């Protein structure tokens, strides 16, 4: 998506070999106009798949997921990384290793908000090694929910996430696909 690629080139900051910082429009300050465009694009791509729910994980997946849910006209559920005091029982849970924070979280979703009649679109801000998405897929499995596809804002195609998800038969749609970071600049996959 050209709009997103241009924004990454303008405001993204490459950290080390494999991390992109996009605090200017996605991970800290949020550009709602851009986020709405992203949500509309996910909705356009996954239209006709009879999606009943958008699923993501807190925190940074929530904004693109909400705009996608708005465009599709369906609710959005986010997995929590810390168990809430008001949410103790009846949970689906999965373990997720965080690539950027180097910690392992148990992510949870209340059984009240996901079930076997749901057809789910998973949305996340980044795809690196596929851990977060795999955790959400595991939760869908526990719920007996069907997965319609995975929508990613920024995919780092040089990491193994896409391969892992495709091997499981997932339709992965990424709005920006990064081929490499070369001397601090971003190179996109040529499609
Ligand atoms: P994965 O679970 O695919 O290994 O990593 C994806 C998760 O890690 C995303 O939810 C995102 O929060 C975080 N992440 C991975 N790579 C990056 C990155 O380069 N930049 C930022 N800002 N977050 C990342």
Image: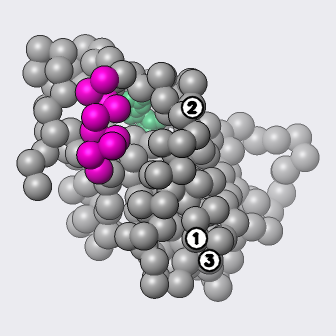
Circle 2 residue: 30
Indicate yes or no whether the magenta region holds residue 32: no
In-image side of 185 versus 15 (left or right): left
Q: How is the image coloured?
A: one colour
Residue labelled with disc 1: 72
> Which stretch appears magenta?
1-10
In the image, residue 94 sits, relative to residue 28, either above or below, namely below
Q: State which tag comes first along the sequence, 2 or 3.
A: 2
- For ligand 1, the image quadrant comes to top left
Query: Which of the labelled discs sits on residue 52, or is there none?
Result: 3
Q: Residues within 10 Å of mark 3 (few under 14, many from 20)?
A: many
Count of labels in the image:
3
Q: Earlier in the sequence, mark 3 or mark 1?
A: 3
Residue 92 percent coordinates (x, y) = 67, 61
- Residue 116's quadrant in the figure? bottom right
x, y percent for residue 41 = 42, 60
- Tell me which secondary structure the magenta stretch mostly adopts: helix
Magenta highlight on residue 4 = yes
State the SS at label 2. loop
Kind of element beneath mark 3: loop
């Amino acid at each position: 998506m050209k709009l997103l690629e241009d924004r990454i080139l303008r405001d993204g900051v490459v950290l080390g070999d494999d991390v992109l910082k996009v605090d200017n429009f996605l991970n800290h300050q949020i550009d709602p106009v851009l986020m709405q465009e992203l949500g509309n694009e996910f909705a356009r791509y996954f239209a006709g798949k009879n999606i009943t729910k958008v699923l993501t994980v807190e925190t940074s997946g929530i904004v693109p997921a909400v705009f996608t849910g708005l465009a599709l006209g369906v609710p959005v559920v986010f997995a929590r990384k810390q168990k809430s005091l008001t949410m103790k029982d009846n949970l689906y849970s999965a373990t997720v290793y965080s690539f950027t924070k180097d910690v392992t979280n148990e992510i949870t979703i209340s059984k009240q908000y996901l079930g076997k009649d749901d057809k789910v679109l998973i949305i996340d801000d980044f795809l690196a090694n596929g851990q977060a998405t795999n955790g959400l897929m595991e939760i869908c499995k526990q719920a007996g929910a069907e997965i319609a596809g995975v929508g990613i804002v920024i995919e780092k195609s040089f990491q193994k996430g896409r391969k892992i998800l495709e091997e499981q038969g997932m339709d992965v749609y990424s709005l920006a696909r990064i081929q490499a970071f070369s001397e601090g600049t971003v190179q996109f996959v040529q499609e």
